[in-house]
Image (spheres, grey):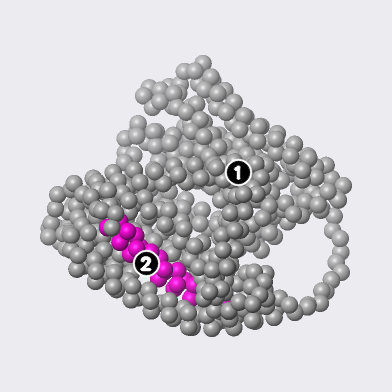
Amino acid sequence: MKDILPLLSLQKRLFVNSFKFATKTEKIRNFFISFVALLFFISVYIISYQVIFYISTLPVIGSLFTIRILGIAFLASFVMQIFSSLTVSISTLYNTEDLQFLYSIPINTSSIFVFKFLLVLFYSCWMIIVLLLPFVLAFASVKGLTIYGFVIMFFAIGLKIIIAVSLGCLLAIILSYLFPTKQLKNIILVFLIILTSVGYTLFRLTEPEKLLNVDHFSELVQYLDFMSKPVAQGIPSWWVTEVFRGFMAKQTNVIIITLLKLFFVTTIVLIVLKTVGEKLFYLTVVRKIKVVNKKEKESYKSGILKMRSLFTTIFVKEVKLLLREPMQWVQFIVVIFLTIVYLFNIRKLPIQYEYVRLTVAFFNLGGIMFILSAIVLRFVFVQPSLEYKMFWLIKSLPIDIKKFFLTKFFVYLPIVLIPGMIIVSISNVIIGIKNILAVISFLLIFLSCIVLTIAGYSLGILFPKKEYKDIAQIETSFGGLLFLILSLCYIVLSLSSLAEPIRKYVLTHTFGKVELWFHILLFLIINFIYAFTTGYYALKKFIKEYV
C-alpha cells in the first residue's frame, strides 16, 4: 500500500495546480463559488441552530421530535449516498485513459483499486459533508457539547458515509462486470432519477406532515408511541441517530455500543469490497482495455443528400440529440414530477378567500418563472457547451451567422413556451383566476419565456463549459450559477414592477390607468434590459470567437 501515497500526492498536485495556473477568469469564478459556498455554510448553520433550539424548547415531545427528524434526515442521506457513489463509481473507476496510464507504471494493482476507491469516496461525499458539518456544529452548540462530543458525532457520520459509498461502489462493480456497456452509467442514472422523482412525488402526495400532527391521533399516548419508534432501525443511518440520542440523554453506554456497531459493519463492508470488489474490478478493467485497444474497421454508408431549410435542419438535429441523450429527456421527466408537486402544493393552500386567491395567483407567476428558468438551464443553456467543439462545421457552411443565431432561439423557444403555457393554465384553474388577471398572467409568462430563452442561450455562449464529463457539470458551472442568479433577480424585479397595481386591484378591484401603464412600461424595460444585454454581447462573442 506504499504506492498509494505517491498517487495521492499526484492528485494533490493536480488540484493545487488547477488553482495555481488558473486564468484570471477562472480565479474570479473560483472566488465567487467559494464566497457562495461560505455564505451557504453560514446560512445552514444559522437555520439549523434556530430550528434545533426551537424544537428543544418544546415540552414533552421536543426530544422525540428531534430524534424523529434526525432519523429521517440520516436515512435520506444514507440512501442518497449509495445512489451518488453508484453513479460516481462507474465514471471514476472505469476511466479508460486513466487506467491505461496507471497500469503502465510499476505499482501494485491493489494500490490502484484503493486509490480509485478513495477518489470515489471524495467525489461522492464532499457535498454531504458540507451540508452536515454546519448542522452538527449547530447541534453541538445548542446541546452544549464539548469538542470531543463534536468529533465523536462526526466520526459516526464518517463511518456511515464509508459504509454507503462502499455499498454503492460494490454495486457499481457488480453491474459493470455483468453488463459491460458504455451506456451503463446513463441507464443507471436515468433509472435512479426516475425512481427518485416518482418516489418524491408519491411521498409528497401522501402528505406525511399529517403524521407529525397530534390532532390526527385519537390519544396523546398513540402520538408519543409513534414518535418514539425508530426509523429503519437495522441500518447505519439509525445507529448514527442513536449516537446523537446518546449525547442528548447523556448515556455513554449507548454511544459506545453504537460506535462499535458502526465500526464493525464498516470493517466487514470494506473487507468484502477489498476481496470480492477488487477481483471483479480487475477482470472488468482487463476486458474494457481489450475492447478499447481493439481496432475496428470503419464503414461508410452512401446516402442521398437532402436539402432542407435552416430552421428544419436545426430542429431535426435537436430532436435527434434529445432522443439520443438520455440525460436530456430524463431531466424533462424530473421537471414534470416537480411541477406536479408544485401544483399539488398550490391546491393545498387556503385560497377560499378572494384576496388570498388573488395574492397567491400573483406570487404563483414568480413560481412558474422559476420553473421556466430551470427548464431553460437544463435544455437551452447547455446547448452552446455541447456544440462548442463542433462549431467549425458552421464556419464551413454558406449561411448567415446572425440568421443561425436567431434560428437557434426560435428552435428552443417551444421547449420553454409550451410547458409555461400549460402550467399557467392549470394553476389558474386550480386557484380559480379568471378575467383580467388570467390574461395578464398569460401575457407575463409568454414574455418571460421569450426573455429567459434569450438569456439562457446567450449566457451559455458567453460562459461555455469547454471540458465536461456530463451535462450536470455544464449546469453547475459558473455560467449556470450566474444564469440562475440573474434570472432570480429578473423574476424579483419583474414581480416588483407590477406589485403596486396588483395590490390595488386586490383591495379595490380596479386599476389606475396611468399608474398601470407606467408599471407595464417599467416591466417591459426590465425584460428588454435582461434580454437585450445578454443577447447583444452573446451575438458579438458568437461572431468573434465561435466563428
Specify the farthest residue to the top.
514
Q: Residue at x 31, y 49 (%)?
A: 138
Q: Looking at the image, do the residues carrying marks 2 and 1 touch, with CB atoms under 8 Å apart?
A: no
Q: Residue at x 84, y 58 (%)?
A: 306
The residue wearing badge 1 is: 27
Q: Residue 201's quadrant in the figure? A: bottom left
Q: Amino acid at mark 1?
A: Lys
Where does the image place residue 216, in percent across and percent down from the top left?
A: 20, 55
Of labels 2 and 1, the one closer to you: 1
Please indicate whether residue 73 sits to the left or right of residue 329 in the image: left
Q: Main secondary structure of the magenta part?
A: helix
| Label annotation for residue 160 | 2
Please indicate whether residue 200 sits to the left or right of residue 332 in the image: left
Question: Which image quadrant: the C terminus?
Answer: top right
Q: Write the start and end of the magenta stretch as one range.
A: 149-177
Q: Residue at x 37, y 53 (%)?
A: 133
Q: Residue at x 64, y 42 (%)?
A: 25
